[in-house]
Image (spheres, grey):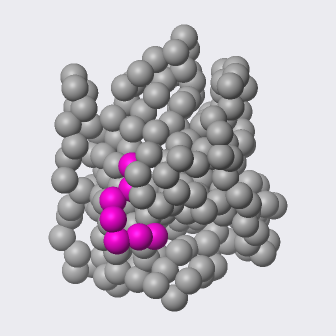
Amino acid sequence: MEIKIKGKKPEIRFLYDMKKVLYDQKWLKKALNFPVYYIYRGVKKRGELRYDITIILHKVLGQEFLKTKGHKHQKKFGELLEVLEGKALYLFQKSRNKEVTDCYVIKAEKGDYIIVPANYHHLTINPSKKKLIMGNWISEKSRNVYDFFERLQGACYYYTKSGWIKNRNYKKIPKLRFKKPLKKMPKNLDFLK
């Protein structure tokens, strides 16, 4: 499934890399390890900004739809996402300890843009039967932090075959709200620096 991008070797996220954030732990015990998604970092550069491409496969993780591991950026960095092929659900949550103060989802398809606000944990879900390809602009200075989702077994909601399910490892979760994506790329990306 790996797609070749000239001069770039992908970082591959395997199923076993995601053990701590998956909903269906019973299914996981019998599952064989396989690539879940591929990340090509630094495909393009614009000053201190880097453009990455991520390819997310279209399998199901037991009851849960395939997703990225999820993270937050250190030092209040934002990010701009772009759907290049397929459909996506982007989940965002603002958390303190085990309490979530804000949580929303953006449903997007090819040609849509999504801004990841600073201080929000986020992940991408592929809800379709086709691969999802997305690009992102982010500062080279930004670093991803995964420990919060690992500690609480994922985000505050899981997207499953039965729909959205609350993660019971959180003390307080607000009602999920939905927002729309941007239809055009912002002209100025200075807000990512």
Going 18% across and 70% down the picture, which residue do you hit?
Answer: 32
Is any part of residue 141 visible from this angle?
yes
Going 20% across and 37% down the picture, which residue do you hit?
Answer: 4
Secondary structure mostly seen in magenta is loop
Q: Residue 107: where, in percent of width, then height?
A: 60, 62
Going 61% across and 72% down the picture, which residue do you hit?
Answer: 157
Q: Quadrant of residue 49?
A: top right
State the count of labels.
Answer: 0
Q: Name the residue nearer the viewer: 154 or 56.
A: 56
Going 52% across and 15% down the picture, which residue do you hit?
Answer: 46
**Could you tell whether 188 is left or right of 12 in the image?**
right
Magenta-colored span: 127-133
Q: In the rendered image of this protein, does residue 192 appear above or below residue 104?
A: above
Q: Residue 86: where, in percent of width, then height?
A: 42, 58
Q: Quadrant of residue 185?
A: top right
Q: Name the residue nearer the viewer: 14 or 85.
A: 85
Q: Name the residue nearer the viewer: 37 or 186.
A: 186
Is any part of residue 72 visible from this angle?
no
Q: Name the residue nearer the viewer: 4 or 168.
A: 4
Q: In the rendered image of this protein, does residue 62 appear above or below residue 82?
A: below
**Could you tell whether 43 is left or right of 100 in the image?**
left
Q: Quadrant of residue 189?
A: top right
**Could you tell whether 144 is left or right of 172 in the image?**
left
Q: In the rendered image of this protein, does residue 66 appear above or below residue 3?
A: below
